[in-house]
Image (cartoon, rainbow, N blue to C red):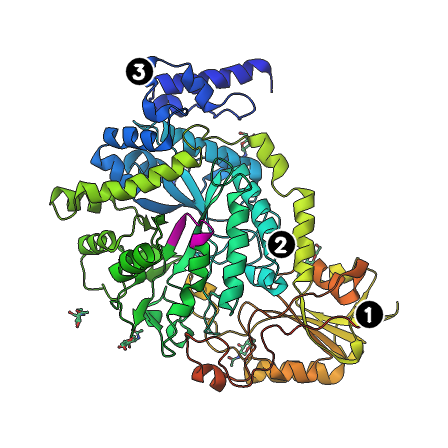
Amino acid sequence: MGISHRSQRRLNVFTSILFTTTAMSAAIHAPSSSEVGYHQVFARSTSEECLPYRDASLPVDDRVEDLIQRMTIDEKAGQLFHEILAQGPNGTLSNTTAKVVSGKLMTHFNLLGGIVNVRTTAQWYNRLQQLALDTRLGIPITLSSDPRHAFSNKAGSAIAANSFSQWPETLGLAALRDADLVEQFGNIARQEYLAVGIRSALHPQIDVATEPRWARISGTMGEDADLTAELAVGYIKGFTGEEGFGTQSVTTVSKHFPGSGPVEHGEDSHFTYGKNATYRGKNFEHHLIPFKAAIAAGTRQIMPYYSRPMGTKYEEVAAGFNKGLITDLLRGELGFDGIVVSDWGLITDAIIAGQDMPARAWGAENLTELQRAEKILNAGTDQFGGEQRPDLILELVKKGIVSEERIDVSVRRLLREKFLLGLFDNPFVDVDAAEKNVGKAEWVRLGFETQKKAYTLLTNNDDVLPLKADENAKFYIEGLNKTYLEERNLQVVETPAEADFALLRLQAPYVPRPGGFEANYHAGSLEYNATEKARQAAIYAAVPTIVDIYLDRPAIIPEIADAATALIANFGASSQAFLDVVFGVDGSRPLGKLPFDLPRSLAAVEANKEDVPFDTENPVFRYGDGLSYADDC
Ligand SMILES: *[C@@H]1O[C@H](CO)[C@@H](O)[C@H](O)[C@H]1NC(C)=O
Ligand SMILES: *[C@@H]1O[C@H](CO)[C@@H](O)[C@H](O)[C@H]1NC(C)=O
Ligand SMILES: *[C@@H]1O[C@H](CO)[C@@H](O)[C@H](O)[C@H]1NC(C)=O
Ligand SMILES: *[C@@H]1O[C@H](CO)[C@@H](O)[C@H](O)[C@H]1NC(C)=O
Ligand SMILES: *[C@@H]1O[C@H](CO)[C@@H](O)[C@H](O)[C@H]1NC(C)=O
Ligand SMILES: *[C@@H]1O[C@H](CO)[C@@H](O)[C@H](O)[C@H]1NC(C)=O
């Protein structure tokens, strides 16, 4: 790329600031920060453009006040919405982007889908920022994301790592019981996020996993509230960075207040059949433990869940609508003064992945959309996730139902966050640096080592692991590609009968659900069905078998514990990580301890009180279980 091209790009940016026309911006490429920062260019522009909110030398509060008094109600309303946004092809803006950014004046978006090409994503991000800077006040975008550093790839809750360093799910971090490691993970994830412009983490998920059937356990830190609290602190520290909250931070959204572990019958509240959180054990307070720790550690934002609390002193309405929970408990008793962003889609019915998804207005189903928006604001919630309905805010204010002062309270919080993140002063990312830094070898290596360490050894008859197979040994395998064994000069055979060992990589049991969106949620029974149990039993009877089970939920697997030669659990691990651990390559060892109990039976699970930890009868394995290889001391 020649010098003339570089200066042309500078000029483009410069002119775009002087003459903010959409027509011109179409041709604009954002500069990389190594060339020239937006602020520098801006400082050289006309005095008329030197507005106080643009002046990085002024205190943030002054800048917020200057900006807010310039804003129309339309511009304020746009800030209150935080919507899903997809990239267009090859780093371009998708067709709907101008509609939400230039049309609805929205500036908060969560990035849908995987980041496969870092360069084009960074380019897309810069184009998105430019579009926002070309609006009247040039309020920059804040880009957010669900977790994207592990394996789980489920629309609406997690995205697979792709280009980023790949770690076990948070359950695997919990298996290692190491807050420093969690902080280190957070630090690395923060830098990878920063590189592509993601400045808001829609996590950590600090729900205490007290109901084993819940489909969202894999994103939690397990069944123990105190461990979750301890690790949440490391997590938030890592995403904040060593210098404290500022231009190098990713803001954290701790979720889902007030702790969504106690879902009735284990059903998730994305769905009509899972509306209720239930407290049969009168254990509501217990679920606040991680939130108290997260607030003390400086989490900037909190997300209430869809569930409505049943049988407590609070109104039986979804948390985002719930004044008792948000204003009285979270802001009042717990002293939280940050941003409250609702979970996605509380107002508007939608079709998600081809499936009808009614608004998650549980307990407020009969309210109109306008009444729902009013109730959410009156609850004390600042921002509407997964919605793009500034029209409702305009109507509420115009009709005098909600005051502009109330809107200002939330807009101030949201703007302040953008200023502190440095987005007004340096909205662009350096495309070359992004490409260089994301997925750095050292970070990828640490992620891989952590996948291995998080392995949790549950049985190991005759100390079969680490496996010392001779060179003629034959392996029957399931759940992994035979090329991985062949690369290690290991022989793969087609049937258990021919094999010396079987290596099975299993997914924890669940009952498949229909629908494009719902199918992502592993719910229902935690046992394999009779057919599958019989199929596995035949293998265990035929050949010494090492079972590796991916625990996204606490599986009920007494039969495997009894019949397999060894049983190890992973919380997200690659095939290479698995084989390294099985063969003890370079000292690879399972060091994990279970982050939850593994129940004995479905009857025991059904008798469990959803809000109470460690209460299924006679579990097969307990929280904290995890053996060591015999050659370890
Ligand atoms: C993507 O963009 C690059 C550079 O702008 C271009 O060279 C390439 O051909 C594009 N690829 C596709 C598939 O459009
Ligand atoms: C997006 O815009 C392109 C180019 O204008 C057009 O070809 C395409 O059909 C549009 N896609 C949608 C989903 O509107
Ligand atoms: C939730 O609780 C209410 C009140 O006990 C009950 O009527 C309802 O059936 C429960 N389940 C759902 C999905 O609403
Ligand atoms: C909502 O409306 C339905 C149908 O009109 C009614 O049966 C139900 O009782 C209403 N629910 C509430 C909570 O008012
Ligand atoms: C196994 O890996 C090879 C080589 O990477 C690939 O060509 C093949 O498609 C894979 N097989 C399956 C079933 O994924
Ligand atoms: C039993 O489980 C297996 C494996 O999970 C599945 O393929 C099969 O469809 C299930 N059978 C029944 C009858 O549910």
The residue under the point 57% across, 69% down is 595
| Neighbourhood count class around disc 2 (C-alpha, 10 Å): few under 14, some 14–19, many 20 upward | some
Quarter of image, ligand 1: top right
Identify the residue at horizontal 40%, vertical 30% (top origin): 424
- Quadrant in which the N terminus is drawn: top right
Where residue 207 appears, as percent x and y from the top left, is 45, 64
Percent of width and height locating residue 504: 68, 72
Q: Which residues are magenta?
A: 295-302
User: Which of marks 3 and 2 precedes in the sequence?
Assistant: 3
Q: Is residue 522 above or below residue 251?
A: below
Mark in the foreground, 2 or 3: 2
Asked if 310 appears above or below 294 in the picture, the reply is below
Distance between the alpha carbons at the discs numbered 2 and 3 = 49 Å
Which residue in the structure is indicated by mark 2? 181
- Of residues 487 and 450, which is closer to you in this image? 450
* Three-letter amino acid code of the residue under disc 1: Asp
Residue at horizontal 56 percent and vertical 79 percent from the top = 556
Name the kind of residue labelled 2 in the image: Leu
Displayed quadrant of residue 492: bottom right
Residue 330 visible, this orientation: yes
Looking at the image, the residue that sits furthest to the right is 471
Q: Quadrant of residue 172?
A: bottom right
Q: Secondary structure at mark 1?
A: loop
Rendering coords of residue 525 (x, y %): 48, 78
Asked whether residue 515 appears in the rendered view, the answer is: no
Q: What numbered label is drawn on residue 48?
A: 3
- Residue under numbered circle 1: 631
